[in-house]
Image (tube, coloured by chain):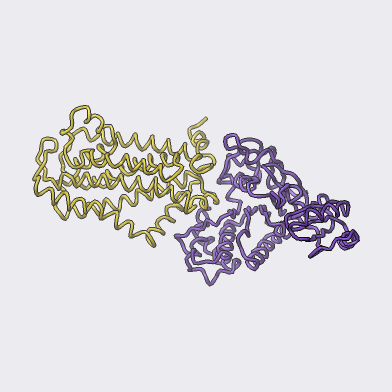
Chain colours: A purple, B yellow
Amino acid sequence: MPESHIIAEGLTKRYGDFAAVDGIDFDIKAGESFGFLGPNGAGKSTTMRMIAATSLRTEGRLEVLGLDANENGPEIRSMLGIVPQADNLDEELRVRENLYVYGRYFGLPRAVVNERADALLEFAQLVEKKKARVDALSGGMKRRLTIARALMNEPKVMLLDEPTTGLDPQARHVLWDRLFRLKERGTTLVLTTHYMDEAEQLCDRLVVVDHGRIVAEGSPASLIRSYSTREVLEVRFGTDKNEQAAKTIEGIGDRVEVLPDRVLVYADNGEQALSAVTDRGLQPVTSLVRRSSLEDVFLRLTGRSLID
Amino acid sequence: MSEQTQSRRIMQGIYSRNTRSVVSRGMRVIARNNWMIVLTGFFEPVFYLLSMGVGLGALIGSVQFMGVDVAYAAYIAPALMAVSAMNGAVYDSTMNVFFKMHYAKLYQGMLSTSLGPFDIALGEIILALFRGLLYATGFMLVTTLMGLNLAWTALLAIPAALIVAFGFAAFGMAITSYMKTFQHLDFVFFLMMPMFLLSATFFPIEVYPEQIQWVIMALPLWHGVDMIRMLTTGIIDFSIIWHVLYFAVMIVVGMFFATHRLKSLFLR
């Protein structure tokens, strides 16, 4: 059993009467990739800030690398790499200076900081940009620089708050590749996301959070197994007719869900479900059979299908 | 419990003894980008001095300071120095801190490292003092060339200006911890304006009725003006001790207050 890196019990953050995080428990092991999945406002970022000891918890226990988070901010952060949701690079400094100065904030010697800055420029594929102004970088480059910066102290744990939000697909894949390399090196990754593909790519284990509470926990595969079927059939009948068609479909597969633009049929065999639908005399405009994904789990658990 | 463990407990979670890195970041930025701001901050009091000291001074001639006649320009020069120390320190510790906190997210980045809020606050205050030192030295050079420093004690006006700046910076930092929007900052500048105009800056405090004099003398700027004026004119009496003491208390209270507000300022 690997040691625990982060332990939370009954972790709570209240702002006045509002509980942003409402009594959650989790235990993140060394070397693990752990994800917080949830809609906007579920309490993911607040949880991340409490782990980083930049937000003080109201109640419960939170131990990060063996230290109490409310009491030991600087000591804890010396072992963390923090990638915030919005880039907060130092715009008054150039690209390489951002790494250098950040390393100095950890109290590391100049020689060490210089050496690491060069190595990380390489890692982040930013060597050519080392003298560039930060505001001249693309979104993907800024993100990579933020991640490189977070690695200056060779952290044991990386906290990544929505690492790829707002990036184009190519930039996301480059970033995933870099994160995967960290994972291979044994760095513990803790990330929040509302992208299901990201969670599936990167997380060994994840919790689904909604309204400040954990509603499910497990590996991506086990969550799909417990909360969805193996396959999903998507059929479209046209905006006005979906509702009507769904009534006829009812009974096929495990579960039927109506979205404004399509009807989802959860079934272990999508092709069989499709022929069952046509057997009932329905002619969908388009149909698609796909593997069930975390998105289906997410929509089911957080009850936030596109209808509301 | 020994004194050392006591102080360690107060600093627990907010201080990592690495203020140096915050200061050196600031120096790097001043050297690269902000020398313009430094330059404009230097010229402001010089322009006041030229228009009011030289211009109005030609009409006014001299005013009495502690019973001695002093040329008008030499009378207001030390006051302008105190005002610029105040303005620089308040600007840095309120507006600048607020901007770096909420817009540039600079502190958010710093607080992703082992730095604590106290490292950052102290670093910012030291940087504000450094800027104050540049302004004060530059201004002294100008007033010396204009022959407005009447005694060798004028040299002490530079450390005196730093004391004034320190007092205001410590308080400004504490006040910023209560700010939620830029509009709240307007309130600070709204208070500073009358303090600038009425603290015996441009005319002797004796023109006021006694009750008003007491009010003015309760405000920090008057102490700064009177202290620096004593030093540059060489007309010094025992009361300068009270001015130094006033700022000593202001610094201690301000730092204590700011330190205790740091968690609410930085760790929301």
Residue sitting at 35 percent across and 45 percent down?
Answer: B90
x, y (%) of residue B69?
A: 9, 40
Residue sitting at 21 percent across and 51 percent down?
Answer: B48
Query: Which residue is at the far top?
Result: B211
| Count of residue discs | 0
Residue sitting at 86 percent across and 54 percent down?
Answer: A248
- Answer above or below: position of B34 versus B133: below
x, y (%) of residue B87?
A: 31, 46
Quick one: quadrant of the C terminus of chain B?
top right
Seen from the viewer's position, the closer of residues A83 and B239 is: A83
Rendering quarter of residue A72: top right
Q: Horizontally, is B147 left or right of B6 in the view?
A: left
x, y (%) of residue A232?
A: 82, 58
Seen from the viewer's position, the closer of residues B39 and A154 is: B39
Seen from the viewer's position, the closer of residues A140 and B229 is: A140
Query: Which residue is at the far bottom?
Result: A128
Rendering quarter of residue A293: bottom right
x, y (%) of residue B71?
A: 11, 45
